[in-house]
Image (tube, helix red, strand yellow):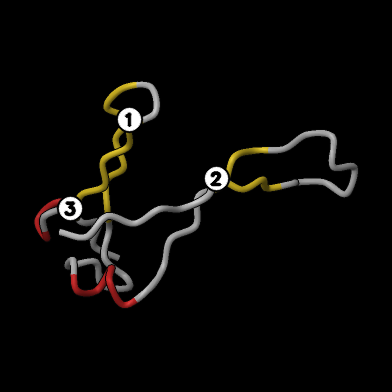
Amino acid sequence: MTTRYLVVNCLYPSASRIDFMPLISIGGKWLEKAGFIPGEDINVEVKKHGELVMKLLPVAEQEVE
């Protein structure tokens, strides 16, 4: 597996720029190679402070629309 280094950015929900939320944006062909296909559902779990784990949901668990 390849390690990626990203930056935690800010999302400003209003024009005031006073209130902000952390934003992590990921994208690229490497996600597809890792099995993440557009339109599929994922689970993001906080394992501990500073650690997130993303996993594809099995097809049986994905919401049928």
Q: CA distance from mark 1 to mark 2?
A: 16 Å
- SS category of the residue bearing label 3: loop
**Looking at this view, is 27 or 6 the one in front?**
6
Eyeballing the image, is 51 above or below 28? above
- Tell me what residue is drawn at x 64 percent, y 38 percent: 21
- Residue 8: mark in rendering: 2
Tell me which amino acid carries mark 2.
Answer: Val
Which corner quadrant of the image does residue 20 belong to? top right
Q: Nearer the viewer, mark 1 or mark 2?
A: 2
**Amino acid at the residue labelled 1:** Val
Instruction: Give the CA distance from mark 3 to mark 1.
Output: 16 Å
Check if mark 3's residue and mark 1's residue have beta carbons within 8 Å. no
Q: Quadrant of the C terminus?
A: bottom left
Instruction: Find residue 26 and report its horizontal and vertical position in percent.
Output: 43, 61
Bin the neighbour count of mark 2 within 10 Å (Cα to Cα): few under 14, some 14-19, many 20 and up. few
Q: Quadrant of residue 53?
A: top left
Question: Is residue 20 shown left or right of residue 49?
Answer: right
Identify whether 10 is placed above or below 29: above
Decide which of tag 3 and tag 1 comes sooner along the chain: 1
Q: In the displayed image of the protein, which residue is found farthest to the bottom?
A: 29
Tag 3: residue type?
Leu
Question: Horizontal and vertical percent for residue 34?
Answer: 18, 66
30 left or right of 27 in image:
left
**For the residue carrying disc 1, how many other residues have a C-alpha within 10 Å: few (<14), some (14-19), or many (20+)?**
few
Q: State the image coordinates of residue 32 (x, y, percent, origin top left).
A: 24, 74
Q: Secondary structure at mark 1?
A: strand
Q: Which residue is mark 3?
A: 57
Q: Give the residue number, with chain letter if any, for mark 1.
A: 46
